[in-house]
Structure formats: structure tokens, C-alpha cells
Image: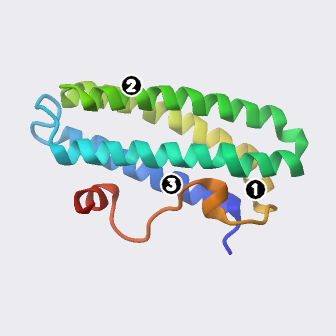
Amino acid sequence: MTALGTQLIEIHHWLREELARLRASLDAPGGGTAALTRELRAHCAGFCAALDRHHTGEDGGAFQALAEQAPELGPVLAELRADHRVVADLLRRIDALLAGAADGRTVRAELDGLAALLESHFGYEERKIVAALNRLAGDPVELLGVTPPGNGDLLERTETA
């Protein structure tokens, strides 16, 4: 089994790539000013759902187990949970934009803010808890909430769903 901390880095890398792919699709001709296509909306919704599952999995699984085994990480885990609430608020805002008539430029601005927040959050999380996570045993899917898919990106999976 891949150590949980190493898998966390892989998940973060995948989420970063998916967000970059999504942001790039909004830069395509017409993506910045035109109404969002069904595919772009589906890709964005899929990414947001995957990120939410990841953070929910951390809060409900990995972080609880980690707090029991490494109580000295309590303040770090509290900060990360607070970040998760901020990210969840931003995801709700993006979801509301997708449900409305927002254009690509508006969604892109929110995704840019999300990208900046996530880069800081992921980096902090990786620096502070990867080694401790690597000491945990358990099912990485349950503890971390989402595993990077082996094939295809979110857009491909949501178009076939």
C-alpha cells in the first residue's frame, strides 16, 4: 500500500492538474466571455465535487485518526479544517455561478482565487502532516476521500456519466 502521506501528495497533484486544465479550458476561444458550455459546467461541477469529497474525507477520516496518533498536530489540523470551510464556501459560490448565467470570465476569476487558496493550503498541509500520515494504517480511499483516477480527466468522466 502506498503510504497515506505520499498518496495525499499524489491527490493534491491531481487536483492541481484538474484545476489547471479547467482554468485553461476557460481560456479557450470564447471561454472567457461566452456563456459556459454544458461540458465546461460539468467539468467544473465534477472538479468541485471531487475537491469537496477530498476535504470531507480528510476531516472525517485521516485527520481524526491523525489527531489520535499525533495529538501535537491538533493546532495544524484545526487550521486545515478552517481552510476546508473557506474552500467549501468558495465552492458553493462557484456552484451558484454555474447554476446561473455566469460567463467564463466570472467563473475564471473565482477559480483563480480558488487556485491561489488551494496552492497555499496544499503546500501547508503537505509540509506539516505528510510524515505523520505515512505512519497511519488504513484504507486511503476512506481516509483521504478521493484517489486520483488512473485514466482520463474529470471532463471525460462527466461527459460519459
Kindly identify which residue carries mark 2: 93
Q: Amino acid at mark 2?
A: Arg
Question: What residue do we see at 32% from left, 26% from top?
Answer: 96
What crowding class fits label 3: few (fewer than 14 Cα within 10 Å), some (14-19), or many (20 or more)? Answer: some
Number of the front mark, 1 or 2: 2
Q: Is residue 126 visible?
A: no
Q: Is residue 63 above or below residue 140?
A: above
Question: What residue do we see at 48% from left, 45% from top?
Answer: 51
Q: Amino acid at mark 3?
A: His
Number of the front mark, 3 or 1: 1
What crowding class fits label 1: few (fewer than 14 Cα within 10 Å), some (14-19), or many (20 or more)? Answer: many
Q: Is residue 107 above or below residue 125?
A: above
Q: Is residue 90 above or below residue 3?
A: above
In this rendered view, identify the residue nearer to me: 22 or 67. Answer: 67
Kindly identify which residue carries mark 3: 13
Q: Earlier in the sequence, mark 1 or mark 2?
A: 2
Find residue 99 and report its horizontal and vertical position in percent.
Answer: 26, 30
Looking at the rendering, in which quadrant would you find the N terminus?
Answer: bottom right
Would residue 27 appear left or right of 81 to someone viewing this image? left
Kindly identify which residue carries mark 1: 133
Q: Earlier in the sequence, mark 3 or mark 1?
A: 3
* Cα gap from disc 1 to disc 2, whole angstroms: 31 Å
What crowding class fits label 2: few (fewer than 14 Cα within 10 Å), some (14-19), or many (20 or more)? Answer: some
Q: Is residue 72 visible?
A: yes
> Does dot 2 land on a helix, a strand or a loop?
helix
Question: What residue do we see at 52% from left, 48% from top?
Answer: 53
In this rendered view, identify the residue nearer to me: 117 or 58. Answer: 58
**Quadrant location of residue 24?**
top left
